[in-house]
Amino acid sequence: LLSSSNLVFGFMPVGLAYHALYSITAALFWGIVIKFAWPDDLEEWAEG
Amino acid sequence: MATVWVIVCYLGALLAFALGSKALFRGTSNDYFVASRSIGPFMLLMSVFGTTMTAFALVGSTGKAFERGVGTYGLMASSSGLIHAACFFLIGVKIWSIGKRHGFVTQIQFFRARFGSNGLGYLLFPIFVLLVIPYLLIGVIGAGKTLQPATAGAFPELFQSDNPILNGGVPPWLTGLVICGVVLAYIFAGGSRAAAWANTFQTLVFMGMGLVAFVLIYNVLGQAGSPTNVAARVTEQGEVVQEYAFDKASGKLAKAEKPKVVGKLKHPEEVEQWAGKQPHLTRDEVEITYKAKNPKTKKVVDKTRDVGVPWLMFLSYMFIPLSVGMFPHLFQHWLTAKSAKAFKLTLIAHPLCIMIVWVPCVLIGIWASGLLPWGMPPAAILSNVLKTLIGNPILTGMLTAGILAAIMSSLDSQFLCLGTIFTNDVVLHDSKKEYTDKQILFMARSFVVGIVAVTYVLALLLQNQNVFDLAVWCFSGFAALTPLVIAALYWRRATAAGAFASVIAVVVTWFTFFAMSGFGGEITVMGGIMPAAICWIAGALAMVVVSLATTPPPKETVDKFFV
């Protein structure tokens, strides 16, 4: 329970590159959540 | 004509693919509504992502970036990557387990059982229908407005128009009829499973076409050294200029001898801050005045555009992606999952899929600021960039197919969910008669046919109205209702009275802001806050205060919904 017009890779505004990296970070975060906090008991409970 | 053939081939392939799922159809109402809860990880990802991303993902994102610049991605896409996945994890997985345990196929069934209140279902039913219908109309009308200019010249004798840009193009009434007919054909036949198959195909098509458009445009604009050099720039005199000109005949992009002035800073004292800069590349706000033709009076008028994104708007926009927690059509997709584990791929891949679709489109929108007239409607930017820079009818057909795929991958789920709600939450819930499974299936299909017909007629009647401004209000309404589902899933003390109070608080605040906006269009209040944020807080407060002030729900009722 995160003003410059510099370019990354020669074409991507740095703000956009930052947020594209942010999207990848979000995916990694959910990957870690799945690994360590997945509610395994739900599957069995759903078959109740 | 080649454009039309590409689109016909796409629609034919879609029908063949979707109807292919008929071989797996088990002939039961449970299979029709929730695919017998048998959809695996990849199809779940494709159907959830395809349903979440409307045509706005391709067309709207480009238009919004053309208007506001790079901040569009942070405003709408990267926040969605985090918040959508949170909704899938915290709401979707739990709803799937409760739905499977109790056999629910609609949201209203869950809320009625969780709060022990029939009345709550009657309150929610019209709200869901009224919030989904504009969404359907946006899809059908949007398809018509996309296809007509894209196919202009294909049928000059058959479909004549006074507007040379539209003359000979497939008219909106025919596009709407074909789109509704194709979606109806596979939803009628295979229900939820057909929608999942169709969405898988459509999602791959619109993701692919977005990338193809990006690569083609990148290659043309790369003649400027970097495509981003093409974006509009502010001069030392405070004028906003387009420095490059594209010669369609030779396919050459070159620096113009005399940059074309498209606007000027509204506040000349800001020249020092902005001189030499490209306002679309940052999130900082700047007001720019430009000239545009009024579509009704045909007179040229001065307009002002806010390039950049105000901080409060950026912050409060985080509430909008919460809408996926309450979309009834997404709710139904969650229930189709084979297991809770099927959600894992969706959680990780959804933010990445958003990035794959949105980054190219936002860049195209930024680049377009240096190429196209500033008065052009935002929804027309993507197709006009392609028409200006590429102009190949086959590629135009492919991109148009991509836009139709994005539209139809949401339409099918919405048609099906309304049919499911009418069948289960109105007829079956209120009927004392016992229906056979075959009768339930017939009833559901009849409702789907009726909803498609009503949508088509409404789209014909409203095709010249600006229904696109309603999109943000549909999202805001669903987003503001999420305290209801969060409390239902995570707060044992939440009561039926609290649920009623929450929904009523949302309806009252939402309608107040909707009226303030002139019944459509994006507004911010209290210095830049999105109305959805205030509606959400009102709904959450009402839920907490009224629940605490009323008798707790019976333990045996609550125990049914908590592991």
Image: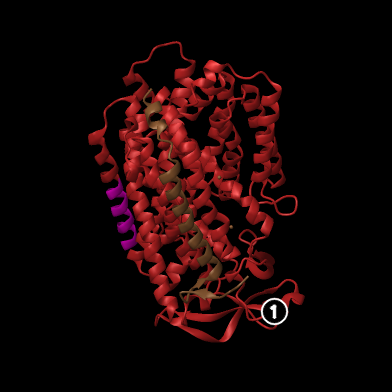
Chain colours: A brown, B red
Above or below: residue B484 compared with residue B102: below
Say whether residue B461 is magenta.
Answer: no
Q: Quadrant of the N terminus of chain B?
A: bottom left
Judge by depth and name the residue closer to the eye, A32 or B456.
Answer: A32
Q: Is residue B26 visible?
A: yes
As drawn, the residue found furthest toward the right would be B269
Residue marked by disc 1? B238
Q: Which quadrant of the view contains residue B240?
A: bottom right
Q: Please, what is the dominant secondary structure of the magenta stretch?
A: helix
Judge by depth and name the residue closer to the eye, B504 or B556.
Answer: B556
Say whether residue B12 is magenta.
Answer: yes
| Image position, residue B471 (x, y; %) | 56, 47
Chain identifier of the residue bearing label 1 in the image: B
In the image, taking residue B409 as reference, residue B266 lies left or right, namely right
As drawn, the residue found furthest toward the left would be B23
Judge by depth and name the residue closer to the eye, B444 or B319.
Answer: B319
Three-letter code for the amino acid on which mark 1 is drawn: Gly
Q: Is residue B158 visible?
A: no
Count of marks placed on residues: 1
**What residue is at 43 percent from the left and 68 percent from the top?**
B387
In the image, taking residue B288 as reference, residue B461 lies left or right, namely left
Judge by depth and name the residue closer to the eye, B237 or B110.
Answer: B110
The region drawn magenta spans B1-14
Element carrying mark 1: loop
| Image position, residue B299 (x, y; %) | 66, 66
| Image position, residue B357 (x, y; %) | 43, 58
Above or below: residue B271 compared with residue B309: below
Residue neighbourhood size for the residue with mark 1, other residues' Cα within 10 Å, grouped as few (<14), some (14–19), many (≥20):
many
| Image position, residue B90 (x, y; %) | 50, 39
**What residue is at 55 percent from the left and 24 percent from the top?**
B121
**What residue is at 67 percent from the left and 30 percent from the top?**
B544
